[in-house]
Amino acid sequence: MLYLSRFTFPDAEWETGFLMGILRKCYDTFYPFKVLSSRGLEEVEFEPITLFYGGNGSGKTTALNVIAEKLRLQRDSRYNRSSFFEDYTDACRYELRTEVPPESRAITSDDVFDFMLNLRTLNQGIDEKREDLFQEYMDAKYSDFHFRTMEDYDRLKTVNLSRRNTQSRYVRKKLMDNLPEHSNGESAFYYFTQRIQENALYLLDEPENSLSPGKQLELVKFLEDSARFFGCQFIIATHSPFLLSLKGAKVYDLDAGPAAVRRWTDLPAVRAYYEFFQAHAGEFQRP
């Protein structure tokens, strides 16, 4: 699905003219001015999956933030901006193939990290409650409790429950639905599968963070299926060779001068992996 078809950033000439008008004042930063224009990125034409590739400081995250701000997409985490961010985004232009659904959002690695941290905190609380229930079980099961008045009714229920169940079953019944305990990679992958719904535009900033190679491949399959079958469009900033291999993706190389569309197999980071494994190919052969 294609919602956003084209996005235009201010060119170097317009930026220079704008900045000349404010140089009389002292500012710490003019961000995001001169970030994308220095890379020659002035216009992007999108596909159902479009990738921004580049190293640190290449501007790929800036491009996502500018697009998200201009389209007023939902987002959870705060992002780097300055006094001139609105001036910059006001000068941007875009074309839509169809209206951007309100469920569309930008997802950053900070969002994923916060989710994992919250999940870990919740699980820690459940672990502490579990330990209390273990002790409660032992106290109830082996107590010489006798029911005397209605004030003892709750205690009676606890004693009876402990005597009818094993310790682990008793704890599960008391905790009801425990939160699943996952590794960071599993939690991160779970976050994406829960956040990304049908029929929406998603901007993903380095989704490979916290994901093992195996989980990255699972995410690749999930994103491909979401774009092909479930009406999603993705704009992704990444330098992961696994995500760069997304089928049918259009890749903008922000490390090139100027930024240009390239085949993913021609990107320097991907070539480095390829040449490394080629050099060690013999070591993968079983004796």
Image: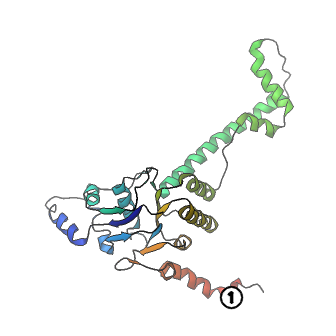
User: Dot 1 lies on which element?
Assistant: helix
In the image shown, does 89 or 163 lie closer to the viewer?
Answer: 89
Residue in view at x 76 percent, y 13 percent: 150
Q: Position of residue 228 (x, y in %)?
A: 55, 65
Residue 54 in the image: above or below residue 21? below
Image side of residue 220 versus residue 90, left or right = right
Please tell me which residue lies in front, 196 or 19. Answer: 196
Quarter holding residue 221: bottom right
Residue under numbered circle 1 = 282
Crowd tier of the residue under label 1, counting other residues whose Cα lies within 10 Å: few below 14, some 14–19, many 20 or above: few
129 lies left or right of 262? right
* 160 left or right of 233 in image: right
Q: Residue 80's image quarter?
A: bottom left
Residue in the picture at 33% in, 70% down: 43
Which residue is rendered at x = 49% and y = 82% of the image? Answer: 266
Return the x and y of residue 60 as percentages of the image width and height.
40, 67
| Residue 116 screen position, x and y as percent | 57, 51
Q: Quadrant of the C terminus?
A: bottom right
